[in-house]
Amino acid sequence: MTTSTASQSSASAPLLDLQALVVAVRRRRRLWAGLALLGLLAGAAVAVLLPPRPAAVTKVLVAHKDDQPNDTGTLIRTDVELLDTTRIAAEALRSLGSREDPEDFMEDYRGTGLTNNLLQIDVTGDSDAEAVARAKALAETFVADHVRRLRQAAEAESKSLLDQRDSMRKELAEVNKSIGDRSPDDEPNASASIESLFARRAELDSRIAEFDQRAAEALTGTPEVVAGTQIVDAPHAVRHSLPRAVVTDAGIGLALGLVLGLALAAVGAVVADRPVLRREIAANLGASVLAELRRGPRRSVRSWQRRRTRAARERLTTTVARLVRGSAEPVSLLELGCARGAGVIALDVAGALEADGPVVVVDALPGTGLAGARRKSGGPTVLSGERAAAEPQHVRRLGVGSVAPGTAWTDLHHLGSRTVLVVRAGHGSAAWLHTVARQLADQRIAVIGVVLIDPDPRDRTDGTLWDGPPVAASRGRDESPKRHNGTGRLRAERPVVPAATVPDSDQEAR
């Protein structure tokens, strides 16, 4: 039992074919490799042409009165924000004797909290000496401001405690006066009142002593905190290594360029929708892939690569020649994106067919000049379409033309009623491949196979249509070829199923 390939593919086709996307991105390696190289060179150029300004760094140990072991860094973040204020910047500039605007100076330095009590200050300047002087002025200004704030807080707390002590002393004086006004001869009922006055006096004495102690502790703890706030790393210039900067910037540029290139290649592959896999090209054209010819390396000096390319061309020539011999009707080669390669294949096939009799290659390729380019002694005769009409009927004809945009479809039938499409992978869009299949079916030209040029070397998909009628047969052609891929295997007979309707593309409309 057989099922329609078109219905299966339409039902199981994913929204985004990751395999096809990976292959398409890999085929556009010139794009993303070029952008990666451009990013590498740009990063290196930036490191050389735009070196960083001279910089200095210093570290300050900041002690806090309310330090806690479980502090999450709130106090040091507060110190960082205090450093980035116009007051600190103005005082540092005043100590340097500079008239620079404090807001402009704030853009030349920054503070970073390394730990809960360690603050790092990074400063830039026009020279190393200026950067070091700025860092020293900022560190000293920050330490002085921090110490002043600590002392002011301690003095304010001590003053508040002493004020409360003085208030209680006044109340104690009134209690003492009340006790002194009492005489031993007072009524016995007044003894309870005297006892309460004595208790109140004792309480006030205790509270006054407590406030005296707290005020003394408030002033005593400040020197320890003040002594703990100091510059622990003297300001020094930051040494700039040009080779390290070049390597770092070049690496960053390489990564950014590579990511950008891969993104552009992926988006371009999705938008362009140019099939690159054998199964996609076969499904869009409605014909099986007979053979493929990989593009050999340019200026290759390796003999095994040349032998492999030569062997592939010989196999391709043998396969196409077998199809031409087994066809009772004229056969043509129609190219899409590989006019020069199709001309070479046509000449090779014609040379292989000359053993069976005279062969004429009918050249209809646009702009290649095949009819006057290659005419060797004993080689196949290459004629243009007008001159080929005068050749005798018993001479075998092998037409070679194009199905690229702008093709005169009605002229293709004169090249042959059966054709082998020579398609370069990734050249035509899916819409145009559908257009080619539909136009050839309308002209009653049967597509007996596809020769794939420059396929992906890692493509492991199957480009063979095991079931389903050819596009030409589905368009109403009575004679349907029973051989599949020229291998002599019979296809299973099945009723003719109408081909799926494909919307017209913009290229076809034009």
Image (cartoon, rainbow, N blue to C red):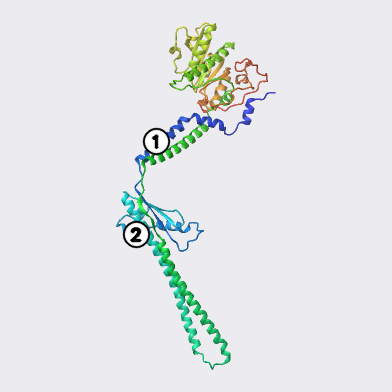
Q: Residue 58, relative to residue 152: is it above or below?
A: above
Q: In this view, does 158 lie above or below 37?
A: below
SS category of the residue bearing label 2? helix
Q: In this view, does 422 lie above or below 10?
A: above
* x and y, in percent, of residue 287 in the image: 59, 21
Tell me the CA gap for discs 1 and 2: 44 Å
User: Label 2 sits on what residue type?
Assistant: Glu
Q: Are marks 1 and 2 in contact (CB under 8 Å)?
A: no
Instruction: Name the residue: 50% across, 20% down.
Output: 407
User: x, y (%) of residue 112?
Assistant: 43, 53
Q: Earlier in the sequence, mark 1 or mark 2?
A: 1
For the point 51% across and 90% down, the residue is 182
The residue where tag 1 is placed is 41
Residue 26 point in image, percent of width and height: 50, 30
- For label 2, the residue is 91
Residue 148 marker: none
Frontmost residue, 399 versus 222: 222
Placement of the N terminus among the 4 image quadrants? top right
Q: Do we see residue 234 in this rendering?
A: yes
Of residue 94 and residue 369, the one placed in the foreground of this image is: 94
Residue shown at 47%/83% (left/top)?
Answer: 173
Left or right, 357 with respect to 238, comes to right
Q: Residue at x 39, y 64 (%)?
A: 148
Q: Quadrant of the rendered structure where residue 498 is?
A: top right
Say what secondary structure mark 1 lies in: helix
Taking the view exactly as shown, the residue that stands out farthest to the right is 1
Quick check: can you spot residue 84? Answer: no
* Mark 2 nearby-residue class (10 Å; few <14, some 14–19, many ≥20): some
